[in-house]
Amino acid sequence: MKTECIGDYVKLMGKVYPCTISLAMDLIGGKWKAVILYHLKDAEKRYSELRKEIPNITEMTLSLQLKQLEKDGLVFRKVYGKKPPIKVVYSLTGFGKTFIPVLETITSWGNQIVLEKGDFVNNSF
């Protein structure tokens, strides 16, 4: 029997999912989560650095997605200092780092699709 078929449902952090794929997609799915994780895979980043590297994401969306990734244990948020201006740095947790091989495969596949069927463009559509 396949691991993902051992039970009728899977449960993580109080949430119940119909299968392991559903659980994984809840953790990393959506338009921005994997992009944020991609930008954190090689080094920790400040919020402002992430905003510069992902210019199409809104501040509110970046903030919400970082909070969700932190809550789900994929991203660690470290605060330096107690008085403003404080420094906040985001990095992948050990659990977040387990996603890097998947992220690299997705990146490679995306690159292949663009090279075969699309175009890389600069700031204009």
Image (spheres, rainbow, N blue to C red):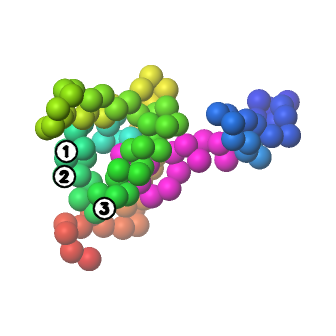
Q: Secondary structure at mark 1?
A: helix
- Looking at the rendered image, the quarter that the N terminus falls into is top right
Q: Main secondary structure of the magenta part?
A: helix
Residue holding disc 1: 49
Image coordinates of residue 49 in percent, x first then y, are 19, 44
User: Disc 1 marks which amino acid?
Assistant: Glu
Front of the two marks 3 and 2: 3
Whether pointer 1 and pointer 2 mark residues with C-beta atoms closer than 8 Å, the reply is yes
Q: Residues within 10 Å of mark 1 (few under 14, many from 20)?
A: few
One can see residue 53 in this view: no
Question: Residue drawn at (23%, 59%), measured in percent from left and top?
Answer: 55
Q: Amino acid at mark 2?
A: Lys
Which residue range is magenta in the image?
Answer: 21-36
Identify the amino acid type marked 3. Answer: Thr
Q: Residues within 10 Å of mark 2 (few under 14, many from 20)?
A: few
Measure the alpha-carbon separation of dots 3 and 1.
Answer: 13 Å
Give the answer, above or below, for where 29 lies relative to 71: below
Kindly identify which residue carries mark 2: 52
User: Which of the two residues, 123 or 52, is positioned nearer the viewer here?
Assistant: 52
